[in-house]
Each structure stands twice: as C-alpha cells, then as structure tokens.
Image (cartoon, rainbow, N blue to C red):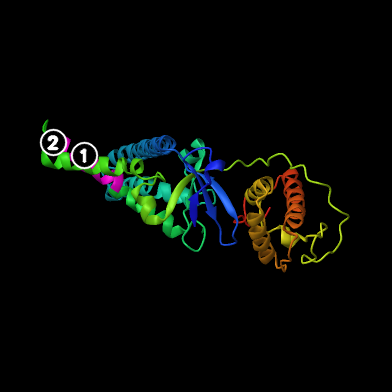
Amino acid sequence: MTAALPQRLRQSDRDRVMITPEGIALPLTLASRGTRAGALMLDLMFIGLLMLLTTIGLLFIAGGTAAAMARLEASTPGAHALEFLFILWIAAMFLFRNAYFLFFELGPRGATPGKRITGIRIAARGNGDGGGRLTADMVIARNLLRDIELFLPLVLLSSASNGGGDMGAAGLAATAWFLIFALFPCFNRDRLRAGDLIAGSWVVEVPRRKLEAAMSLAPAATPAAAPPDSAGSAAYRFGEAELAVYGEYELQTLERLLRENRPEALHAVYEAICRKIGWTPGSGDARPFLEAYYRALRARLETGMRMGRRKADKFSDSL
C-alpha cells in the first residue's frame, strides 16, 4: 500500500511512503520525468553500441568466410556458414532490443546500466495488502509494453516517412500513437508510463547506501535477558537471527521514526518488529524497545560494513 507523505514531512511532490506487510513505513522518492528520459536515452545508446559492435564483428567474420569461399570456389559448407552468420545477426539484434531491459531489471539491482548511472531503479507499487517485492511477471509485463509504446510507432513512422515527403494518414496516426505513450507520464501524479501502470511498478530514486550519523540516544542499561513484555524495561538483548531480519534501509526508517517520536507510529512499528522476530509485544515500552533494537541493528550493520559486507534491506539474503 502506498500513499503520499504527510505535508510537514514532504520535501517535494515526488515523495511517497510504502507501508510494508509488517507495518513499517518506507519513504520513497519517485524518479523525475527528466531522469527517466535520460536513463532511457543512455540505455538506447548502449543498445545501439552493442548492435554496432556485433554487426562489425559478424561482418569481419563473414568477410573472412567469403574470402575462404573464393579460395575454395564457393563450396556449399562456406555458403551455409554465411547463412548461419546472418541468422546469428538477426537473433542478436532481437535479443539486444528485447532482452536487454529484461536481463538487467530482473537482476538484484532492478536497474539497467542507464538507470544505475542516473541513480534510479524499478520498484513494486504494492497493493492493498501492503508493499510487495518486484517480481519477474512485473518486469516482463512492463517491458513487453515498451514495444507497443515505443518501437512499433517508431517503425510505422519510419515506414511512412520512407514512402515520400507526405506521410499521410498512417504517418499522422503513428505520430499520435507515439506522442500519447511518450507523454503518458506527464498526465499522472506518479510519473507512470503505460507499462508501469499495467505491471504494478514504478521507478524510484535509489536510496543512499551510507548510514546516517548515529542518533544521540540515552545510554542503554546493562544488557540483560529481559522479556519484551516487561513494562518500562530499557534493557534488551537480541540474537543474530533477530537482527538479521532487517537491513540499512529499515534502519534509516526506524531512525526517522524515533526522531519524529509519534506514539501511535512507534507502537505500530514496535508490534510489527516483535511479531517479525518472534517476540510478544508488551505494553508501554515501545520506545525503549525500538531504541535498543536500533542500537543493536546499527552495530551489526556497521560491523558488516567494516568487513566489506552489506545488507541493503530486508529483501537482501544476508550480509
């Protein structure tokens, strides 16, 4: 489930918050239309470069094969080799155009090289049951729609323009088709293209990987095995399995929650974390618990970072 941030916490109209199934609010910033366009231009440039290098490489191989055929008086095996190279070129062009986006967006980063350079990635919008993970179905759906949104109208427009100076009705229809889908993100508040709308995805800015400066919390009491339902207790001890549930992104969210200090939000997240790690929520000790969990989780993540290991969020497998 997603919603806009409260007005007092919003820095721009692109700020959103996703409520996860555990009840934790994850703030997100939607990628701007200009950034998305820039990422697409970079990706198309990379695809064009790959196509060009592949074509040159296959032409070089074909030239060698043709020279060999001339020396062997155009033997049948040589002709078959040229046919195979032509089929290989067609397959390569198809894969570069269609599989490029799928390959990178189905990866753990959820971003093509163009998106990574511009600092954005694909994310799931979630549904009424809470935020969800980006799935292969979403990525495939949004990229299959790209053919309808971009490539087909461009092909039709190119065909119409090659027919003469006057494009005619077909050219005008192709132009209108292209403009409708190209300008689609300008007419909805979440900057969604048609593929995002169908797939249930959106494009967001990549959160910062660096941990924020540690909060200045009151020193914790001497560690003790106090049960979580002991009202007013400020001493907690968490095991590795209980801390391994969350990562850097959730730590930063928890820090913002502690800074805002809204009792209802603190209690909701307190209960969600207790359920997630297998503890029984108590009453009246939400903030002491969350402060202790924040300290312990931060210490674990910083220790891993010093050893060159990261856990970006709860979806990451491990440090």
The boundaries of the magenta stretch are: 149-161
Observer-nearest residue: 76 or 15? 15
- Based on the displayed image, in which of its 4 quarters is residue 171 positioned? top left
User: In this orientation, does residue 305 appear?
Assistant: yes
Q: Is there a contact, CB below 8 Å, between mark 1 and mark 2?
A: yes
Asked if residue 310 lies left or right of residue 226, the reply is left
Residue highlighted by disc 2: 167
Q: Amino acid at mark 1?
A: Thr
Residue at mark 1 to residue at mark 2: CA–CA distance: 10 Å
Residue 194 position, x and y percent, is 34, 49
Q: Is residue 153 magenta?
A: yes
Residue 303 position, x and y percent, is 76, 47
Please name the residue shown 39% across and 35% down the image.
Answer: 41
Binning the other alpha carbons within 10 Å of mark 2 as few (below 14), some (14 to 19) or many (20 upward) gives: some
Please name the residue shown 33% across and 48% down the image.
Answer: 146
Q: Main secondary structure of the magenta part?
A: helix
Observer-nearest residue: 225 or 146? 225
**Mark 1 or mark 2, which has the lower sequence index?**
2
Residue highlighted by disc 1: 175
Asked which secondary structure carries label 1, the reply is helix
Observer-nearest residue: 308 or 270? 270
Q: Is residue 132 magenta?
A: no
